[in-house]
Amino acid sequence: MARSRRTRSVLAVFASAALLATGVAACGSDDNTSGELYKNPVTLTWWHNANQDGPGKDYWKKVADDFHALHPTVTIEIEAIETNALQRTRIPAALQSNDPPDIFQAWGGGEIVDQVAADYLKDITDQTKAEVASIGSAAEIWAVDGRQYGLPFRMGIEGFWYNKAMFAQAGITKVPSTLAELNEAVTKLKAINVIPIAVGAGDKWPAAHYWYNFALRDCSVATLRAATKEQKFDDPCFVKAGEDLQAFLATNPFQDNFIATKAQEGANSSAGLVANRKAAMELMGDWNKGVMETLTPDRKGLGDDLGWFPFPGIEGSPGDPKASLGGGDGFACAKNAPAECVEFLKYIVSVDVQKGYAAAGVGIPVAKGAEAGLTDPVLQTIQQATAQASYTQLWLDTAYGSTIGNAMNDGIIKIFAGAGTPQQVVDQMKAAAQK
C-alpha cells in the first residue's frame, strides 16, 4: 500500500487504568470558531468498517441519523467497508485522490504519522482540547508532534474468544493461562474432532497477531518500548518470537486451508467458524463479539456459550505475563473536510453516544461513564482485563507504521505458509526501517 515515508516514532502504549477512566465532552464546545457552522447544507461522507449487517452497522447508522436530526443542514452518507480493504487499499488510494471521504476510520500510531506527513489530515487540535484532555493518554495515539489529528471511540485488548460448551465437552476445566495449557487444550479439542483454533490468515494481520503476542511474551517491556521509539529490532527476542510461532504451528492448531481463510466475512471465515460452532477458539480483538453475531442465521452468535481469556504467558520467558496487546479504533477528518466533520467526530465520542455504543455490545468505549452501558458479561471481562493489564502494547503494525508493518506481516505470513524463517521476518523489518 502506498504511504509516505515515516518521519518519527509514535506512542506505543496507553495507560490501561487511565483508559477506562477517560471522558469526553459533548458536541458543541466553546472551541468552535466557525460562525458558519450548520448554516449551509453540507454532505459528509463517512467510511467505517462495520460492514456486516448487525449491531455495529445499525448503531453507526443511528448515530448518523441522530446527528442529522440535531443538525438538519448536515447529511451523512455512509459507506461500510471490510477492515482489510478499508485499511490497506481504499483509504490509502482515496487519500491520494482529489476526493477522499470526509471522515474515515483511523487506527493511529505509525499509520497516522504517515498520513500527517503526506498532509492528508485535518488538524483538529484547537477544536478538541476538551475531548483530548478527558480521554487522556489514549488520545496521544492519534496525535503527531503534539497536534491532534483524530480521536478514538473504542479501546481494548486482544484475547481468545472460545466456546464454553466445546471446552466442557473436551474436558477443559479452566481457561489456559500458560502456553503449555493452551497446547494441552488444543490436544483435547482434537480428541473430540473439533477444530481447536480458527485463524483468518488470508487477511494477513490476524495471523500476524500470533507473532505479535509471542514477541510480547519473549521481549521485555523495555525492549518493546525501545523498538517502537528507535525502530531497531536487534534483540534476539524478535527472532525467538518467530521460533515460538513455528513451534506452535507444528501442533497443527488451525483449520484446513487457514492460509486462504478470511477473518470476518461469511460463515466460513475464522470468526464464522467459531460463531457457527465449527471451531472452538479465535484470537481477536474486543470487537469480535459483534462480528460473530452477524455471521450466524439467528444473529446471536454463540450466546451464553461465548467466553474470553487473554493470551497465555510463556513459562520462563522475559516478557511480562500480565502485559497485553491491544489498541483501538478511531476516526479522522480529511484535510479539506468541512468544519462540520470535526463536530460529528466530537459527537461520536460524546458520553451518550458512547453509552449507546457500549450497549450495542460491539466494543469497549473510551468515554468516562460510558462503560455503564456495557451489559454483556464477556465485554465486562475484557474491560476489567484491560484495566488490570500491567502494560498494553499497541498493535505492532500500527505502532511501527505501514512500511515496517507491511514488511513484518508479509514475513510472518511466510512462516504460516511454511516458506519463511524467523530471521527473515526480522531482516525484512530492519530493511523496511531503513526506508
Image: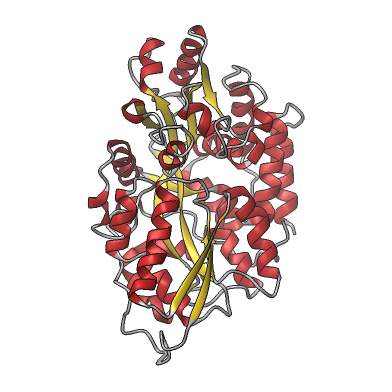
Residue at screen point 50% across, 71% down:
149
The quadrant of the picture occupied by the N terminus is: bottom right
Residue at screen point 66% across, 58% down:
90
Q: Residue 185's spot in the image, x, y percent?
A: 45, 16
Front-lying residue, 323 or 198:
198
Q: In this view, does 246 lie above or below 157?
A: above
Horizontal relation, residue 236 to residue 178: left or right:
right
Residue at screen point 40% across, 80% down:
127
Return the residue found at the far bottom: 35
Q: In this view, does 420 lie above or below 369?
A: above
Horizontal relation, residue 185 to residue 206: left or right:
left
Front-lying residue, 291 or 234:
291
Colour mapping used in the image:
secondary structure
Return the residue found at the far top: 191
Q: Residue 428's spot in the image, x, y percent?
A: 74, 45
Front-lying residue, 426 or 5:
5
The quadrant of the picture occupied by the C terminus is: bottom right
Front-lying residue, 201 or 102:
102
Q: Is residue 132 visible?
A: no
Residue at screen point 46% across, 51% down:
327
Q: Residue 262's spot in the image, x, y percent?
A: 62, 36
Horizontal relation, residue 254 to residue 179: left or right:
right
Q: Is residue 258 visible?
A: yes
Horizontal relation, residue 421 to residue 152: left or right:
right
Q: Residue 26's spot in the image, x, y percent?
A: 29, 72
Figure quadrant of residue 381: top left
The number of callouts visible is 0
